Image: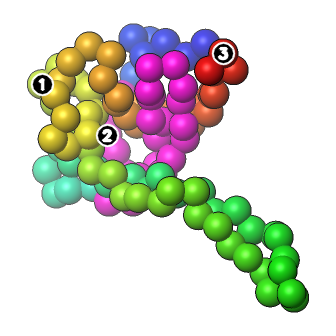
Amino acid sequence: MLNAFFVTETAPEVGMDATVCYVTDRVSTKITHVSENGKTVLTWDGKAVKGWTWNGAEMVFDDSPEYRTWTLRKNGRWIVKGQPMERGATHLLVGVKDDYRDPSF
């Protein structure tokens, strides 16, 4: 099990792995942009699925693609821009690639 308290945060870089941590699930992503001051990053949360063909054409689906902007808060966590900095909030772990879907939901 991944415990956020034991993960050492590193300075973000473009192309670096990251993990979006929800209440029980974790989804890996990539950092696509880092601001000059290093306190804002963008991630791409879409996952392309291809290989399915229909009438000879290859179909590509994107599972709810979106860029997401994260800001580094005074508590040391990366939180979605505009969201409150509360305990249990969705946050980003920089430098960690981890996927987990809670099967109980």
Query: In which image quadrant can residue 97 be found?
Result: top right
Q: The disc labelled 1 sits on which kind of residue?
A: Lys
Q: Residues within 10 Å of mark 2 (few under 14, many from 20)?
A: few
Residue position marked by numbered label 1 in the rendering? 74
Query: In which image quadrant can residue 76 be found?
Result: top left
Q: CA distance from mark 1 to mark 2?
A: 15 Å
Q: Nearer the viewer, mark 2 or mark 3?
A: 3
Q: Position of residue 32 (x, y in %)?
A: 39, 59
Q: Residue at coordinates 19% horizontally, 35% vertically from top-left?
A: 83
- Tell me the quadrant of the picture where the N terminus can be found: top right
Assess whether residue 43 is covered by the magenta stretch.
Answer: no
Residue position marked by numbered label 2 in the rendering? 11
Residue position marked by numbered label 3 in the rendering? 104
- Tell me the quadrant of the picture where the C terminus can be found: top right
Q: Are marks 1 and 3 in contact (CB under 8 Å)?
A: no
Q: Is residue 74 above or below residue 2?
A: below
Q: Is residue 40 above or below residue 10?
A: below
Q: The disc labelled 2 sits on which kind of residue?
A: Ala
Q: Are marks 1 and 2 in contact (CB under 8 Å)?
A: no
Q: Nearer the viewer, residue 62 or 7?
A: 62
Q: CA distance from mark 2 to mark 3?
A: 34 Å
Q: CA distance from mark 1 to mark 3?
A: 33 Å
Magenta stretch in the rendered image: 9-33
